Image (cartoon, rainbow, N blue to C red):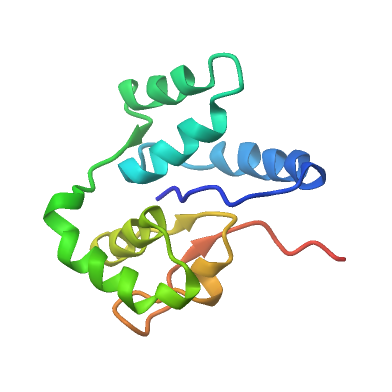
Amino acid sequence: MVGAPAGTNHGDSDNLHTWAVELLATIRPPLLTCEPVLSEVAYLLRRLAGGPVALIDLLTRGLVQAPFRLQDEAAAVRQLLGRYADARMDLADACLVRMSEIYADCELLTIDREFRDVYRRRGRQAIPTVMPARRPR
């Protein structure tokens, strides 16, 4: 599963891009995500020429799929938003946590450490994540 990108500073962008390119070269499609994540990604790509179109191309080529249907999972997502209200969980994060419950054999690709450090699936289970190693400060 592919998670929503968290805000990064420009110094991290090149390192994160390299990490993502190397990782994606090792993964067999399709990558699963949800429409709230796609919306966030399209927003972040809006200033790159062809960025949102390239995202849609990934969908039409079947490399990325969004099988999650929020209407079907609204009650579970609402419960997650309530449970993590203090952590300021957004809709995309709640959908991804729910997807981690539905697709239990998948790993979440993300740079958002809340998925490892804060959020839990089924109340107590860690969410399997793949993320870049912490950089020394």
Is residue 28 among the parts visible in the rendering? Answer: no
Q: Position of residue 2 (x, y in %)?
A: 44, 47
Name the residue at 16% across, 66% down: 75
Residue at x 35%, y 37% (from the top left corner): 30
- In the rendered image, residue 108, in percent from the top left (x then y), is placed at 45, 57
Q: How many marks?
A: 0
Left or right: 77 in relation to 13: left
Q: Quadrant of residue 47?
A: top right
The quadrant where residue 96 appears: bottom left
Q: Residue at x 58, y 52 (%)?
A: 6
Task: Give the quarter of the image for residue 104.
Answer: bottom left
Quadrant of the image for the C terminus?
A: bottom right
Q: Look at the image and tell me whether residue 76 can be seen.
A: yes
Residue at image x 25%, y 73%?
A: 79
Where is residue 133 shown, x and y percent of the image?
Answer: 70, 62
View extreme (top): residue: 49
- Residue farthest to the bottom, as pictured: 124
> Which residue ends up furthest to the right in the rendered image?
137
Specify whether 31 is left or right of 67: right
Front residue (pair 112, 74): 74
Residue 1 percent coordinates (x, y): 40, 50
In the drawing, does residue 34 fall left or right of residue 27? left
